[in-house]
Every structure is written in structure tokens, then in C-alpha cells.
Image (cartoon, rainbow, N blue to C red):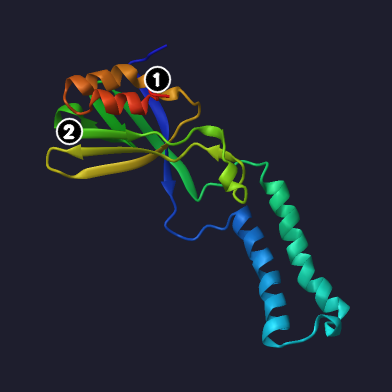
Amino acid sequence: MINDYKTFNIYIPSKNFVWTRSRIILILMAISFVSIFFLVYILKIPEKQIPRWLGLSISAPMLIGFLGYLINMWFPEELKGKIEGKLIFEKEKITIDNEVFLIKDLKYIEIIQNDHKGRYISRNAFDGMFSQGCNNILKIRLLNNLEKKCFFQINHPRELLQISNQLNFYIENGLLTKEARNTTLNYGF
């Protein structure tokens, strides 16, 4: 059913380094590879002369990292930021985290749909195999040429269909083209 408004969660990427499961796994594996490289190629210690305890202490982080990788790839990706605030699409206005933008004050609207929650990500096995759906972007430009951009979360593959009335209204007001709407709603697929 198409509503007069639709609310999405806003995703705010962190500006700082965020420790995630995948980064910890990569560091564990890197420690092992760097240690092996250092012993064999820098210190030039033959493999047979490396003490057993040292070999075990080098291979343990690699084994833990590999097992962590196998386990982690079945979980959703970890966000490097937080979900905070609401994005609301209405006919006459767009609200981004309590900041209201009236349609009459906008020059254009661009919605880039890249993602939805639970989508399988084959290339992202270190971070988890299932998406959190936060790589979707809303860009608006005001009449005074200021641009506002936010990331938002889509929970279902066709969830943007619920704002098709609003998108049609934006087309009528010259803020969006039909091709952009079709791309946003995945009509071409």
C-alpha cells in the first residue's frame, strides 16, 4: 500500500577508525604473515631451526583468524557508523533528522538505491555475507545551491516502491526525471 509518507532510518558513517570483527581477523592473520616473513626473510632463520613454541605462537593467530573468517562470513556486515535519526519522504517536504526541506525550496533530488538489508554480498566475506542495507543515498540541492546528502537504510528490496507517489510529485515539480525515478524504483531490472 502506498502511503502519504515513508520513514527510513538514517545511517551516519563514523569519521573515526571502528574496530570490527573483520578488521580484528585481518590483523590476526597479518601478524602471522609478518612474523613468518620477518623470521624467514629478514633474520634468515631456516625453518628447521625455528623453535616449536615460536612456530605455534606464530601459527595460532593465523588459525584463529582463519576460523574467525569462516564464522564471520555467515553474519551480517558490521556497520562502521551508527543508525540514528529518520528520513521522511512526504509530498510537500523531505525531513532529514528533524531538518525540514520544502519541495518548493529544492532545485533537484537524487536517490541512489544500492542496497537492502539482508542482501547477499559475495565479495564482502571478511565483513560478513549479508548487507545491513545502509549504502543508499539521498542528495538534495536547495535553490541557494547548498547540497544536503544522507545515507539511509532500506529493509526490503522493493521498499522504495512505497514512495512512488512522492517521486511522481517530485517529477511534476521538475525535481526528478522519469528515468531517475525508474532507476530508483528498479523498473529497468
Of all residues, the one furthest to the left in this rendering is 144
Pointer 2 residue: 106
| Left or right relative to 143: residue 176 | right
Of all residues, the one furthest to the top in this rendering is 1
**Amino acid carrying mark 1 in the image:** Leu
Report x, y in % for residue 14: 44, 53
| 2 vs 1, front mark | 1
Q: Which mark is residue 189?
A: none
Q: Quadrant of residue 42?
A: bottom right
Pointer 1 residue: 161
Question: Can residue 166 be seen here?
Answer: yes
Please tell me which residue lies in front, 56 or 16.
56
> Who's the residue at 15% across and 32% down the image?
105
Q: Quadrant of residue 77?
A: top right
**Is 153 located above or below residue 60 in the figure?**
above
CB contact under 8 Å: marks 2 and 1 = no
> Which of the marked residues, 2 or 1, is nearer the chain's N terminus?
2
Helix, strand or loop at mark 2: strand
